[in-house]
Image (cartoon, helix red, strand yellow):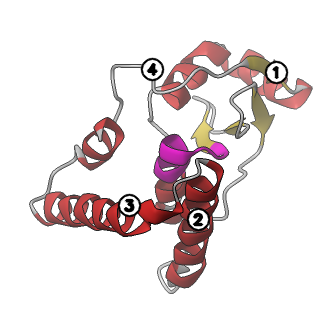
Amino acid sequence: MTLSRILFEPGHVSILPDAAAALAESGEDAKLFLDRHVTGDWGEISPTDRSANILALAIGGELLSSYRTSRGVALSVMTDARRSGTYILPGDAVEKEDSETVPDFEGFTVAVGLALGEFLFSTGKPEALAKSLAAIEAVASATLLASQLGSESTTAIVAEE
């Protein structure tokens, strides 16, 4: 799914030489992949990485996308947490999950908790924890409901919150 609006500014864009060679070989422009990345079309990433990207949009963090050129060569696009730089890299920066792999919900939950705690502390509003948790629950519930209804706009719903 591609969103039609830019979700973040990529900062300075750097293309590593092997990635530039893969793009030249395929005849594709790096802008095609960069446009997909900044509009929330993350390409071929795992559900865990997709969730991490959505969280990173909301509270800051690294953003990762993975694509293939028309010749099947893997490219990764990464934007740093401060949005000061985006890098187009050769290869697939994402580990493919096989059907037997169970998502690391505990690790993701810990990451969300740490990020929320740090955010509330840095803004000087630790008393907002209960309200923040209620908001997270509401968005998560809406996302689950949209998924159960077969909606493909789940990312757009969360991104607009």
**At label 3, which amino acid type do we have?**
Ser
Q: Earlier in the sequence, mark 4 or mark 3?
A: 4
Task: Please name the residue shown 79% across and 38% down the image.
Answer: 90
Number of the label disc, if any, that sits on residue 6 = 4
Left or right of 20? Residue 28 is: left
Q: Which residue is mark 2?
A: 117
Q: CA distance from mark 4 to mark 1?
A: 19 Å
Count residues near mark 1 (Cα–Cα under 10 Å), then give few for <14, some for 14-19, many for 20+: few
- For the question of whether residue 126 can be seen, the reply is yes
Q: CA distance from mark 4 to mark 2?
A: 28 Å
Q: Nearer the viewer, mark 3 or mark 1?
A: 3
Magenta segment: does it hold 57? yes
Count residues near mark 3 (Cα–Cα under 10 Å), then give few for <14, some for 14-19, many for 20+: some
Q: Earlier in the sequence, mark 3 or mark 1?
A: 1
Left or right of 86? Residue 7 is: left
Q: Which residue is mark 1?
A: 14
The region drawn magenta spans 53-63
Q: Nearer the viewer, mark 4 or mark 1?
A: 4
Q: Earlier in the sequence, mark 1 or mark 2?
A: 1
Residue nearest the viewer, comparing 38 with 75 = 38
Does dot 1 land on a helix, a strand or a loop? strand
Q: Which residue is mark 3?
A: 132
